[in-house]
Image (tube, rainbow, N blue to C red):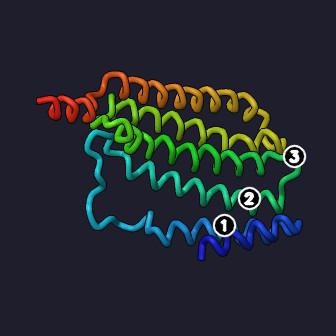
Amino acid sequence: MAVLLDVLGVVLGTAGLTLAATVFLAAAAVVAAIAIRVFSAPERPAKTIGIHSSFPVFLRVAYAWSILASLLGIWAAVADVHGGIWGGSRHALTVGFAAMMVMTVGPRILPHFAGVRNLWSPRLMFATLLFLFGGCTLRVSMEPLAYEGIAQFAWKLLPISGCLELSAVLLFALQLIMTFARGQSIFHELAAADSI
């Protein structure tokens, strides 16, 4: 159902029916979250060995950003004049949802591709996600205020959002570099065991 609603939203958007498209896309975001039960109580605790225990919280936050992005899209279709609401919507989707998913799920799965068992620093993972969340929250809340001319002070806060998000990207990169450089690979252990 979520995919069908997404496709309908894209078709309507392509046809120039922007408001109808944003409504279908918002419905798709909500249905997708319901379908995978992202906000439901889990049957078992999340597997957080080797990563920060906030992992399931930030996964839910990412899906909340996708829903917020779609709701901002509806608002933008009705009221955007200078691109600020559309910009907030795009930022909520690209940074709030997509980047948050990458920086939440990445530390959980990327080390395993290299055969590394543990993340270099689970606390650094948490700091990364906090920086990303803070930067995205600031950007999404200030962009409509600044670009739509609602509040001039918002222009002074927008650069801070970029600094926070860039910090998150740099911390994420540092985490992966240190994880791969210092982590004990199971492939070396297997090779050593085979040589015995």
The residue lying at 71 percent from left, 57 percent from top is 72
The residue lying at 31 percent from left, 34 percent from top is 116
Q: Which mark is residue 82?
A: 3
- Find residue 79 and report its horizontal and vertical position in percent: 83, 58
Q: CA distance from mark 2 to mark 1?
A: 8 Å
On screen, residue 65 above or below 8: above
Q: CA distance from mark 1 to mark 3?
A: 22 Å
- Find residue 69 and report its horizontal and vertical position in percent: 66, 55
On screen, residue 92 above or below 10: above
Along the viewing direction, whichever of 185 and 79 lies nearer the viewer: 185
The residue lying at 64 percent from left, 51 percent from top is 93
Badge nearest the viewer, 1 or 3: 1
Q: CA distance from mark 3 to mark 2?
A: 14 Å
**Would you call the spot at circle 3 few (<14 residues within 10 Å), some (14-19), or many (20 or more)?**
some
**Amino acid carrying mark 3 in the image:** His
- Find residue 179 and report its horizontal and vertical position in percent: 36, 28
On screen, residue 74 above or below 140: below
**Amino acid carrying mark 1 in the image:** Ala
Instruction: Name the quadrant of the C terminus.
Output: top left
Instruction: Name the quadrant of the N terminus.
Output: bottom right
Along the viewing direction, whichever of 127 and 113 lies nearer the viewer: 113
**Would you call the spot at circle 1 few (<14 residues within 10 Å), some (14-19), or many (20 or more)?**
many
Q: Earlier in the sequence, mark 1 or mark 3?
A: 1
Does the CB distance between marks 2 and 1 fall below 8 Å? Answer: yes
Q: Which mark is residue 26?
A: 1
Q: Is residue 54 left or right of residue 29?
A: left
